Amino acid sequence: MSKAGYHESRLVHDRKRDVVWKALWRYYFSKRIRPDDCVLDLGCGYGEFINNVRARRRIAVDSWDGMPDHLDDGVEPIVGSVTDLSRIEHGAVDFAFSSNLFEHLTRDALAECLKQLKPRLSSRGTLTTLQPNYRYCASEYFDDFTHVSVWSHVSLPDFLTANGYDVLEVRPRFLPLTVKSRLPVSPTLIGAYLASPVKPLGKQMLIVARPRRS
């Protein structure tokens, strides 16, 4: 199956995602990414995250060859696997991010991705990942036929630790699982959801980690 086939069947472009990512930038990521940062989006897909980022340098990696067509001017596209980050300089990246990526990778592939990323992070560089949390979405987890690995807010931090990262933050319920519903999506509602200590339907986790310092 081609990546194009996956985007035509399971990951069709949805304008609701644009609304979600604009709101996530406004209410969350803009407070954690500096204007002088270099930001790396691993498995960027349609580029909804990286297109909304305001930073000195923006890099997007995805194996889908249609990805560059969806990126804004100024975003550097790298078409290739996240297990080969050789085109990115060592120490260049201040904020690495992935959304709904790690469940598509085998454990060996994820370990290689983390290994490749480590030297490319700056002295203050971190990895933030947004993921389906199997603990809260087991019945829907494999509705996506390309999911190959199971991760929860317990197992993924443990895996990061085992692969040389220190886990800084774990939010087991950060966002609902999907925008594929009839519920309205609005920036105001998303901002209120992020600010609320109660997360109804929260089935995606957010984890922040950095390479362990020797």
Image (cartoon, grey):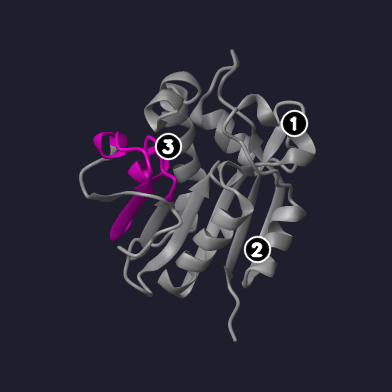
Would you call the spot at circle 1 few (<14 residues within 10 Å), some (14-19), or many (20 or more)?
few
Tag in front: 2 or 3: 2
User: Residue drawn at (50%, 49%), measured in percent from left and top?
Assistant: 98
Residue type for callout 1? Pro
Based on the picture, tell me whether residue 97 belongs to the magenta stretch. no
Would you call the spot at circle 2 few (<14 residues within 10 Å), some (14-19), or many (20 or more)?
many
**In the orientation shown, which residue stands out farthest toward the front?**
1
Which residue position holds label 2? 160
Residue 59 - label? none
Residue type for callout 2? Leu
Could you give the CA–CA distance between mark 2 and mark 3, rounded to whole angstroms?
Answer: 28 Å
Which residue position holds label 1? 200
Which residues make up the magenta segment? 42-70
Do the CB atoms of the residues marked 3 and 1 lie less than 8 Å apart? no
User: Residue drawn at (26%, 40%), measured in percent from left and top?
Assistant: 68
Q: Say which label, 3 or 1, has the lower sequence index.
A: 3
Which residue position holds label 3? 22
Q: Position of residue 88 (x, y in %)?
A: 32, 65
Circle 2 — which element?
helix
